[in-house]
Structure formats: C-alpha cells, structure tokens
Amino acid sequence: VQFSCVFTWQSCQFLLFLLSPCLLATLLLDSCSAGTFWHLSDLHLDYQYVAGGNLSSWCHAPLQTPSSQHPSAGPDGDYNCDSPYSLVMSALQAMVRLQPRPDFIVWTGDSAPHWSSPHPPDQEYVFNVTKAVFSQLDQLFPGVPVVPALGNHDSSRLTSFLYLQVTMTVTPS
C-alpha cells in the first residue's frame, strides 16, 4: 500500500509519499524478498547521564547515599533514564558485529533525550546528538545508505513540530 499526503506549510503545498516497508525495500534493493537492513530508533542519547546518578533527576546528578529504596544509575544505563553514550555505542557496535554490511539502515529518529527539567535540550544539543549518531553510523557502516526520519524528540522543543494542514488519501498499490 502506498499512502500519499498533501500538506501546506507557509502557503506552499507539498506532496509526500509514504511507502510500505516492502516498497521501500524494493526501491533500495533489486527485490523485496532478499537483503538485510537495520531499523534504528529511540536511542535517546543523553550526554548529561552520570553513572551513580539519581533516578529522580534523569540520572544527571550523583545520588549522595544510594540505598535499596533509592538506587542509583548503573554505568551503562538505567531503565528510568535516557541512554548514556556508552550504551548507544554498545548498541551500534553490536549491530556491526551482527550484520556489518546491511543493504541499508532505516533510522526513525528520537535520538535526543526526554528530559525537560530544569529546561529541555536546546536546538544545539538536539543537533549535536543527531550529528553524533549520524557520524557513528557513517563511520561504522561506510557506504551503507541511511534512510532517516525525524522523531518527536528531534526538534528543539521536544515533541513539538510546526502545525501542518494535512489531507491524506490512500491508493492501492
């Protein structure tokens, strides 16, 4: 199934085609029945993550006295916090070990962290996180096409994009 979408932004109309995964694979490969790819999403890289950090402050500040009631963050991440650099790199390196030459990589964003207190990441922070992930993909998978898409945490004010007037039609393939 192929979806087409017409939207208007700043008095300009755009036509966007959303392709099914099989159709996308067909465009990037000779056939839909063969090939490999990676789908990478929701890394939520947080440069402010601190091993031993307080879980109630996004693992940014060290917890003074960890206890069983108030555990601290581990060196390579915690479920209650966004990802430290070491966890993101470990995931990307595992991808290389498991499939070093995929036909392409689909990267569906959400690379920036969730936190919003005391203030959300600014545009420069979000840009640097996105650049760091892309640079690592480029270095670890040289020559492999990357198909990127922005996630809701890849804007300078998290979970907010410009309002777009959207009209959607579905056409059978």
Image (spheres, rainbow, N blue to C red):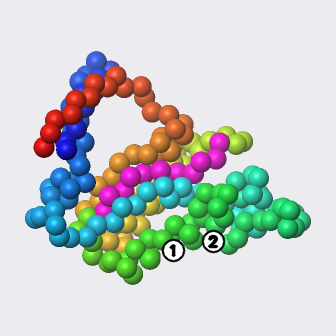
Which corner quadrant holds the C terminus? top left
Question: Residue 11: x, y in percent?
Answer: 28, 18
Residue range corresponding to the magenta coloring: 105-116
> Relative to 5, is 21 above or below?
below
Residue visible at 36% across and 61% down in the picture = 39
User: Does 1 lie within the magenta span?
Assistant: no
What label does residue 160 carry, if any? none
Mark 2, other Cα within 10 Å: few <14 / some 14–19 / many ≥20: some
> Relative to 87, is 43 above or below?
above
Residue visible at 50% across and 45% down in the picture = 153
User: Along the horizontal axis of the image, is 6 left or right of 83?
Assistant: left
Confirm whether residue 106 shows in the render.
yes
Q: Which residue is mark 2?
A: 76
Residue type for callout 2: Asp
Question: Residue 93: x, y in percent?
Answer: 44, 76
- The answer to whether mark 2 and mark 1 are in CB contact below 8 A is yes
Using the numbered discs, state the Cα–Cα distance from disc 2 to disc 1 in whole angstroms.
9 Å
Question: Residue 52: x, y in percent?
Answer: 76, 67
Confirm whether residue 9 shows in the render.
no
Residue visible at 28% across and 67% down in the picture = 37
Q: Which residue is mark 1?
A: 90
- Mark 1 element type: helix
User: Does 112 lie within the magenta span?
Assistant: yes
- Residue pushed farthest left? 30
